Amino acid sequence: VIIQAPMAGSQGSALAIAVCKAGGVGSLPCAMLSLEAMRAEILAIQAATDRPYNVNFFCHALENLRPPMVSFHFGLPSPELVDRIKKMGAQILSTATTVEEARWLEARGVDRIIAQGVEAGGHRGMFLTDDVTTQLGTMALLPRIIDAVRVPVIAAGGIADARGVKAARALGAAGVQVGTAYLSCIEATTSAVHRAALAAPHHTALTNIITGRPGRGIVNRVMRELGPIRADVPSSRAPRSLWRRCAQRRRSWAKVISRRCGPGRTSARTRTCRPPRSPARSRQSN
Ligand SMILES: Cc1cc2nc3c(=O)[nH]c(=O)nc-3n(C[C@H](O)[C@H](O)[C@H](O)COP(=O)(O)O)c2cc1C
């Protein structure tokens, strides 16, 4: 299975629908949506496709709309909420960045674990540690997590074409989750500045100075001058709102914000989306 990674701020239902129609699992990130907007986006997906799709949260949840899959970043919500989602009939996925996190998630009833390597674009889903030196690359992390748990494991981080899918499957992944490669699709809401940066040669780094949590983005002036990793950043949304206020004042928000992405290649051309071709589609078990 190829899951389009939920990418808050860079996409909505249009990308999820396009990916579902192309044969993958489209995801809707809900972290930056109001309840009303989330509802409208989910209804749009349900109206457009019968294929399974995923809705994603930074640890909160929903009812009534009965999505087939719900994924979380940064651990899980309360056990009661996890139980309610299961009773709704949804499969639960969550991100692990270490073997310990994978075991923790399995013990709490997660149906599939997303093994997120350190090369992944966007926030690290780390939740049992904030020590970035514990973070392994996808191909090193994946077999360790597969050996440690019984549930199917999805590989995420740096996978951008059929070779990456093949490598992940060779190591035992039940599927892959791909983010950065979808950022240049026409259905994504990626900003023009972000698209231009992705199309040019670029350098990505892990940084915690944009939101207070470690994440991978294209190195920009803020990261060069202040970071990329600092011990004295508040672990909250404060830095981001500070940058937002500064940037709005100077009308250069797009230059200041993090341009999140991993090292995975994206097409320089704007294109309609197709998930990377899986070399083993016919043998998919999940
Ligand atoms: C721009 C961007 C935004 C992201 N936002 C989210 C999000 O809202 N929720 C989430 O679970 N993961 C998010 N991620 C992380 C992805 O789930 C996934 O781990 C990552 O994209 C995989 O690595 P890749 O980008 O190299 O394919 C985001 C990634 C990117 C690039």
Image: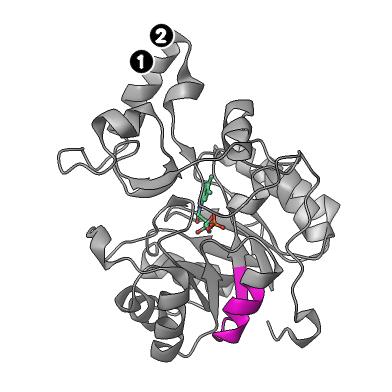
Q: Is residue 127 left or right of residue 171?
A: left
Q: In the rendered image of this protein, does residue 113 appear above or below residue 73? A: below
Query: Mark 2 highlights which residue?
Result: 249
* In the image: residue 84, left or right of residue 135: right
Q: Residues within 10 Å of mark 1 (few under 14, many from 20)?
A: some
> In the rendered image, is residue 67 in sight?
no
User: Are the residues tagged 1 and 2 within 8 Å (C-beta)?
Assistant: yes
Residue at the farthest front position: 201
Identify the residue shown where x is 42% and y is 24%.
Answer: 256
Judge whether 12 appears above or below 283 on screen.
above
Q: Which residue occupies the extreme left position in the image?
A: 232
For the residue with label 2, is its CB less than 8 Å from the closest atom of ligand 1? no
Q: Residue at x 54, y 85 (%)?
A: 171
Q: Residue at x 38, y 77 (%)?
A: 102
x and y percentages locating residue 244 in the rendered image: 40, 22
As measured in the structure, the alpha-carbon distance from the residue carrying label 1 to the one carrying label 2 is 5 Å
- Magenta span covers which residues? 165-176
Query: Image quadrant of residue 66?
Result: bottom right
Q: Secondary structure under badge 2? A: helix
Does the stretch in magenta take in 167? yes
Residue identifier under label 1: 246
Q: Is residue 210 left or right of residue 82?
A: left
* Residue 141 versus residue 43 in the image, above or below: below
Label 1 sits on a secondary structure element that is helix
Where on the picture, by quarter, is residue 236? top left
